[in-house]
Structures are given as C-alpha cells and as structure tokens.
Image (cartoon, rainbow, N blue to C red):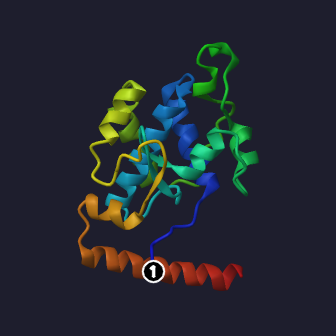
Amino acid sequence: MEIRFKFHPEKAVEVACLFLKLHGKPMSYLGLLKLLYMADRIALERLEQPITGDRYVSMNYGPVLSRVYDLIKGLDVPGAKDLWSRYISSRDPRYKIYADYTVSLREYPGDDELSEAEVKIIEQVYAKYGHIDPFDLAETTHLFPEWVNPYGSAIPISVEEVLKNVGKTDEDIERIREEFEREDYLDWVLNG
C-alpha cells in the first residue's frame, strides 16, 4: 500500500500564510510552491510525516504540492477553496505586471493547526530560502533526487521516494507505512 497522507487544507493554508507573513509582501507563486515543498520534505525527514499531507508532482520548475497549486490557479479543491481564498489572494492588483504570478496575504489566520516543530521548520526554510529568486529556487529543487524532468507534464512523486531521498531506510519507511495504515484505519473507524 502506497503511503498517501490525508490532505489538511487548514494546515496548508496556515503554512502558506506564515510564509507570506514572513515575506511581508506579495510573493511569486513559484517561490511559494518551492518553499511549501521544502517544508513538507524537511518535515518528512524530521517528523516522519508531512505538514500539509498534499500529493507531490514533478513539474518543469521542480516538485510541487498538487492541491495547493490547484488552489493558486483558482481550481476547486473540496474543503479548501473557500478557506484558501479567504486568507490568500492569488492576484494582487498593486503588482499589475506580475498579478497572474503572485499571491498575497489577505488576512493572517494564525498557526493553531501547526505544531511548534512545524512552525520551526517553516521559519528555518524561509530564513534560508525565502529571499532567493523563485527561478533560482526552482533550480535548487531540481537537485532533489525525487524530481524527474516531466518535459511539460506532471509526474507523481511518492512519499516513499521522498522518504528514501531524505535518508530513511527501507525499515524506517515500512514502519512509517504501518503507522500511517493504523492512523488511517482509526480515522476511518472514528469518522466513517
């Protein structure tokens, strides 16, 4: 069974909002997507679970969180689109030339859904990468072994690939899979 963590729209919004708050002005959506991926990747390494639970894909400019990318494009993601658009604007009229390529913070929702460890990861990722040109950041993500050039399409990246590439052993991955299956089963029992 492939590990497919549950997508947490509230956490995805809070992570994106925290990056935008730290940035202090509208941000290129390409840059935001790279920072989000890096934060999830580091969380998989340190916490053995992602922050957002999103699915990953290789795209021309590097790995991307697929549902967050859909939200940025204004597509419907069940349980997430209204929440996203309440806190994040995908077009900022103050930056007319780049309006189609920036996201900005409408209102900060706080970080109640995020653990202290997750907030620390987000802050560290922003401190290290938050001011790098988005295209240079994309080039940096091309160095991640799980990224494969999709030549204009999108290729899924499995959680197992990411875990392996951040140094987890086959035994670690199997243990993480078993924990995921237990949690997934309990969630199904409790929530139907």
Q: Quadrant of residue 117?
A: bottom left
57 left or right, relative to 108: left
Q: Is residue 112 visible?
A: no
- The residue closer to the viewer here, 148 or 162, is 148
Seen at 27% across and 59% down, the residue is: 165
Seen at 49% across and 47% down, the residue is: 153
In the rendered image, residue 105, in percent from the top left (x then y), is placed at 63, 31
Q: Where is 59 relative to 97, above or below? A: below
Q: Where is 188 relative to 23, above or below? A: below
Seen at 62% across and 15% down, the residue is: 95
Q: Residue furthest front?
A: 151
In the rendered image, residue 77, in percent from the top left (x then y), is placed at 69, 53
Q: Is residue 184 visible?
A: yes
Q: Of the residues shown, which amino acid type is indicated by label 1?
A: Met
Q: Where is 66 relative to 108, above or below? A: below
Residue picked out by circle 1: 1
Dot 1: element = loop
